[in-house]
Amino acid sequence: MKTFLYIVLVFSVVMGCHTSKKTSTDERLGNTKQKDTVKIVNEDLEYEIIIIDPGFSTWLLSQAKPEGFYSQSYLENRNKVYVTEWNQRVQQPQRYDPNLYELSIDYKSSIDYGYEVNYKLYNYFIYFQISHNQRLGPFDPRI
């Protein structure tokens, strides 16, 4: 069975979901301009990340460190921290803006998603923190 890791960002809202929520994800994808979409596919693991957020693809190309700058273990360690904090905020809508933290992200640290998935996920977290003045962990979000 093919499993998807979706991170869909529409106007800076993140949603992580399995294929069981594919319908609502597909509807959001259909209503968003293609140029605002960053898609990462790992065919071997059958995982996919889709990031839809106006400005992220431009930011990724113009401001993020180039691929290869960070090691995969560095990215994985940071992503674990960011995903954990993100998911905690999703569960506390009375404390954190539910428009920013809408759905949890299904990221399992026991799975090797590969470099590209971790690189783009990490950079989205940096972009999100900078553009929304948020802090998702003990690290300063910097480029």
Image (cartoon, rainbow, N blue to C red):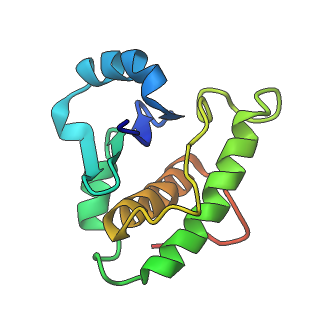
Which residue corresponds to the image point at 59% horizontal and 31% vertical from the top-left? 103
Asked if residue 108 lies left or right of residue 92, the reply is left
Question: Residue at (24%, 52%) from the top-left corner?
Answer: 43
How far from the left and from the top, in percent, is residue 98? 66, 27
Q: Quadrant of residue 81?
A: bottom right
Residue 96 locus on image (x, y percent) = 74, 35
The answer to whether 86 is drawn above or below residue 42 in the figure is above
Q: Which of 81 and 98 is in front in this view?
A: 81
Residue lying at the far front of the rendered structure = 1
Which quadrant does the N terminus fall into?
top left
Q: Which residue is drawn at 34% across and 76% down?
A: 65
Kindly give the residue lying farthest to the left in the view shown.
35
Q: Is residue 134 visible?
A: no
Between 105 and 102, the residue placed more toward the observer is 105
User: Would you place residue 123 above or below residue 7 in this image?
Assistant: below
Tell me what residue is drawn at x 47 percent, y 37 percent: 12
Quadrant assignment for the C terminus? bottom left
Total tally of numbered discs in the picture: 0
Q: Which of 23 and 54 is in front in this view?
A: 23
Where does the image place residue 106, in percent across and percent down from the top left? Answer: 56, 44
Quarter location, residue 104 = top right
The picture places residue 122, in percent across and down from the top left corner, at 47, 63
17 up-or-down from 133: above or below: above
**From this viewpoint, is residue 31 visible?**
yes
